[in-house]
Amino acid sequence: MKFGTSTFPTDYSIPPIELARALEERGFESLFVTEHTHIPVSRLSPSYIPGDLPEQYWHVYDPFVALTAAAAVTTNLKVGTSVCLVTEHNPIGLAKQVASLDFLSGGRVIFGIGAGWNAEEMADHGVPFKDRWKITRERVLAMREIWTNDEAEYHGEFVDFEPLWSWPKPAQAGGPPVLLGANSKWTYDRIAEYCDGWTAIDRMTDVADGLEQLRISAEKVGRPMSDFDITVSTAPEPERVEQLIELGVTRILFGAPSEPAETVLPLLDERAKLIEQYS
């Protein structure tokens, strides 16, 4: 079983370098970080969490800068986004960022993606909320072309470019695994069409039902469930961990708060005791 940590790495919390070293020393498989380029001061979009939006949402580092720092001081720790907001990036530039990190880290990237929930935030990037998933799909498919082909081109409704050269190619052939973070009724068809797995937040979605829906979607396109990486963020509760393992989840993530090292490191010590049971 694979165990990782997810966090909002901020300018006031444990630095990514220190966190990455601590995770690898304690036997964690991976570090996942989130993304927001900014949060508009005035917005109507309700967030997916109740109450006021925590300040970590607008203090978070750029994920690729943070993960490059983490990868540079570790050897085996996988580095991932949970999630990269594809709607906030030019696909040619994003393909270069992801490929560069994967190449420099020796193939340790896991590329979790999402379209985002904040309409005002993506509007600042020129993306209409109603088109977010169409745009996400085309950008992912275009990036795969760049990662895979010496001369890449893509022609879609929202992404359109003539043959181009772009190196480095990712260390992982064809690019890092792409995990979709979402839980709507359309999520599973999207995963089956253009992704390599699902990243879900436990108790915000029914994981068992989601896996069944993914199986149905995968069958429609002729893909086995073994094709998919299933990553679930949950609380470090042994009973729930056992349940998720029985469901066939690939990786479990425990969240780390956006707090200084003196708060975070003792939590990692406690969680390391739990994951030792599965090593």
Image: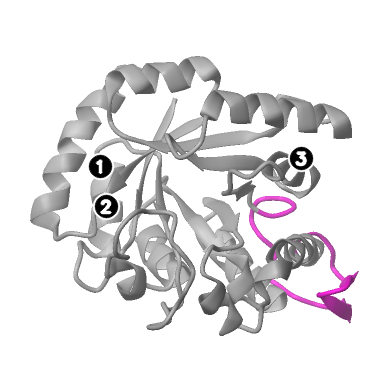
Q: Which residue is mark 2?
A: 21
Asked whether, in this view, residue 269 is left or right of residue 2, the answer is left
199 lies above or below 141: above
Q: Position of residue 164 (x, y in %)?
A: 84, 79
Magenta stretch: give its range: 147-175
Task: Give the residue displayed 87% in from the left and 73% down from the top.
Answer: 157
Task: Give the residue displayed 89% in from the left and 71% down from the top.
Answer: 156
Applied colour scheme: one colour
Q: Residues within 10 Å of mark 3 (few under 14, many from 20)?
A: many
* Quarter of the figure with the N terminus: top left
Identified by mark 1, the residue type is: Glu
* Quarter of the figure with the C terminus: top left
Disc 1 to disc 2, C-alpha distance: 6 Å
Task: Choose mark 3 or mark 2, whichever is in front.
Answer: 3
Q: Which residue is mark 1?
A: 25
Disc 1 to disc 3, C-alpha distance: 35 Å
241 lies above or below 115: above
